[in-house]
Amino acid sequence: MANIKVLIVDDEPNIRDLLSTSLRFAGFSIHAVANGTDAIAAAEKGEPDIILLDVMLPDMNGFSVTKKIRSMGITAPVLFLTARDDVDDKITGLTVGGDDYVTKPFSLDEIVARINAIIRRTKPAEHEDSMIEVGEISINQDAHEVFVNGEMVDLSPTEYKLLRFLMTNPNRVLTKRQILEHVWEYDFNGEMGIVESYVSYLRKKLDPMTTEPLIQTKRGIGYMYKVAKSGH
């Protein structure tokens, strides 16, 4: 993990120092800042591989920071650090382009595990066909680009991985647990809400661009990417 650059954003010096020291020891390259303004500048200049972002910052909240960097075309995964175990906070974090969240107090082992899982799921796939085409959607895996009827759609790294998993299993019902294990790669202790939130947000981006909704809900089971049998 020596080449993985982590940007830490937290206004509490003790947490910032603890994370910096521990993650350096774990082999990551670290840059730490204390507010949202510095975070945006550091994300633009430093090109981090992942951002650990506190939700409560003195100048702006972490959600605003994420919206800003996403609007600038910065796609680095964001792991939110939140002091409040609030479902609304979590869903907000995901819908503005965050990739995961962890609630304070957290263990350092958990932070390292989450970082490694996010890096695994967002890095480009290897030894696979570069293009996936299913129905009206195509994915260029080399460039991590998604097209709907030829028009590019902007997805976060986790949205991309979720869509890719659904598309590589067309017309097959995938349970929420299967999606959780494949896309997030660790146990959320039965917390299926993250899957529902991400599917909902993916639909908001895709449905206006497709002839009909492609991601269907199978109540009590999970979701299916539905395409005509004559599709690719």
Image: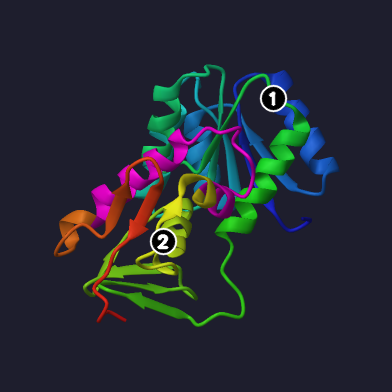
Q: Inspect this view and state whether residue 52 appears.
A: yes
Note whether 129 is above or below 183 in the view shown.
below
Q: Label 1's element?
A: loop
Q: Would residue 23 appear left or right of 231 to someone viewing this image? A: right
Split into 4 quadrants, where in the image is the C terminus? bottom left
> Where is residue 85 shown, x and y percent of the image?
52, 19
Note whether 92 is above or below 151 in the view shown.
above
Report the front residue among 219 and 115. 219
Q: Look at label 1 and name its amino acid.
A: Phe
Q: Residues within 10 Å of mark 1 (few under 14, many from 20)?
A: few
- Does label 2 or label 1 sit earlier along the sequence? 1
Looking at the rendering, the stretch of residues picked out in magenta corresponds to 180-206
Front of the two marks 2 and 1? 2
Report the front residue among 19 and 135. 135
Residue appearing at x 53%, y 53% in the figure: 183
Q: Look at label 2 and name its amino acid.
A: Leu
- Residue 197 colored in magenta in the image: yes
Residue appearing at x 56%, y 58% in the figure: 122
Q: CA distance from mark 2 to mark 1?
A: 31 Å
- Residue 38 colored in magenta in the image: no
> Where is residue 172 shown, x and y percent of the image?
40, 63
Q: Residues within 10 Å of mark 2 (few under 14, many from 20)?
A: many
Report the front residue among 163 and 151. 163
Q: Would residue 11 appear left or right of 159 to someone viewing this image? A: right
Split into 4 quadrants, where in the image is the N terminus? bottom right
Note whether 109 is above or below 169 in the view shown.
above
How many discs mark residues in the rendered view? 2
User: Mostly what secondary structure, the magenta segment?
Assistant: helix
Name the residue tied to disc 2.
Answer: 166
> Where is residue 42 shown, x and y percent of the image?
55, 43
The mark found on residue 106 in the picture is: 1
Residue appearing at x 50%, y 82% in the figure: 129
